[in-house]
């Protein structure tokens, strides 16, 4: 599509990519691994895009893989607005939980905006071939919790963290939210069998598959992208959308 636009003499081409695929392959985890996120960035740039507009990159440094401007929108404001309306004054008695240590910064930023406490699920193997042991860092006993992550793929980590919050931490109830719902494999089955009351996802990916699950609720990012696109083409600053 970018190539077709370029050959049709387009003045400027912006690639709007709500979910940037291969974002998790942003480094060599082991010998001879590809860095696919960089390859995809090269392909988009080589095709002729002048700018990329995306949302909640798995790692913010992926913006550096491009030699063109990248606007990485945040889904945080959508979740903040949703949970502020859903829980109102009760929000101050709730806790935001990061499902793993890697998502702490993202969860902390969300917790500050909704004025909630923060807890972390730490999973580790004590020895080889032993089951993972879950520890909950922070006080979640008797509280309503919101698990906050950037994406739900097979939902294994999310559902295990939800179980740990209830079994180990003693939480009263668990809600969850994530920007991207890939929902591959047996994700729907896991979510249905988990203690998660509701999973809020952004519609950055097709919603047909997830709509079959009664626990999943989709929130629209269309207004956010619409304003970003308008501001880009009117050449107005879009920094307001990052706050």
Image (cartoon, rainbow, N blue to C red):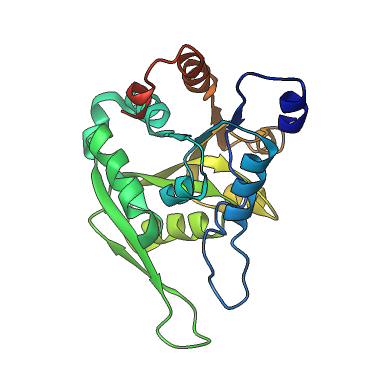
Q: Position of residue 71 (x, y in %)?
A: 46, 33
Q: Nearer the viewer, residue 66 or 132?
A: 66
Q: Nearer the viewer, residue 77 or 91?
A: 77
Q: Is residue 237 above or below residue 143?
A: above
Q: Nearer the viewer, residue 102 or 58?
A: 58
Q: Nearer the viewer, residue 214 or 42?
A: 42
Q: Is residue 67 above or below residue 171?
A: above
Q: Residue at (23%, 57%) from the top-left corner?
A: 138
Can you see residue 197? yes
Q: Residue at (63%, 18%) from the top-left corner?
A: 11
Question: Which image quarter is the N terminus in?
Answer: top right
Total marks in image:
0
Q: Is residue 120 above or below residue 229?
A: below
Check the image and name the residue furthest to the top: 234
Q: Position of residue 64 (x, y in %)?
A: 45, 48
Can you see residue 154? no
The reply, left or right, for residue 203 in relation to residue 168 is right
Q: Residue at (49%, 61%) from the top-left corner?
A: 160
Q: Is residue 70 above or below residue 130?
A: above
> Splitting the image into 4 quarters, where does residue 235 fall?
top left
The reply, left or right, for residue 203 in relation to residue 3 is left
Q: Position of residue 81 (x, y in %)?
A: 36, 24
């Amino acid at each position: 599509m970018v190539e077709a636009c370029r050959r049709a003499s387009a003045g400027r081409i912006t690639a709007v990519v709500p979910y940037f695929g291969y974002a998790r392959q942003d480094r060599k985890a082991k010998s001879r691994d590809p860095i696919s996120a960089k390859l995809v960035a090269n392909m988009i740039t080589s095709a002729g895009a002048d700018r990329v507009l995306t949302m909640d990159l798995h790692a913010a440094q992926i913006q550096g893989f491009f030699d063109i401007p990248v606007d990485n929108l945040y889904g945080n404001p959508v979740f903040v607005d949703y949970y502020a309306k859903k829980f109102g004054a009760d929000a101050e008695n709730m806790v935001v939980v990061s499902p793993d240590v890697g998502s702490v910064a993202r969860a902390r930023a969300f917790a500050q905006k909704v004025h909630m406490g923060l807890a972390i699920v730490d999973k580790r193997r004590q020895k080889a071939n032993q089951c993972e042991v879950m520890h909950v860092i922070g006080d979640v006993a008797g509280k309503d919790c919101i698990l906050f992550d950037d994406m739900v793929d097979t939902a294994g980590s999310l559902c295990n963290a939800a179980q740990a919050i209830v079994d180990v931490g003693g939480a009263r109830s668990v809600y969850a939210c994530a920007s991207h719902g890939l929902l591959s494999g047996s994700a729907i089955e896991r979510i249905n069998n988990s203690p998660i009351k509701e999973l809020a996802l952004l519609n950055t990916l097709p919603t047909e598959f997830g709509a079959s699950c009664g626990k999943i609720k989709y929130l629209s990012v269309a207004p956010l992208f619409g304003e970003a696109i308008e501001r880009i083409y009117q050449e107005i600053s879009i920094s307001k959308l990052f706050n």
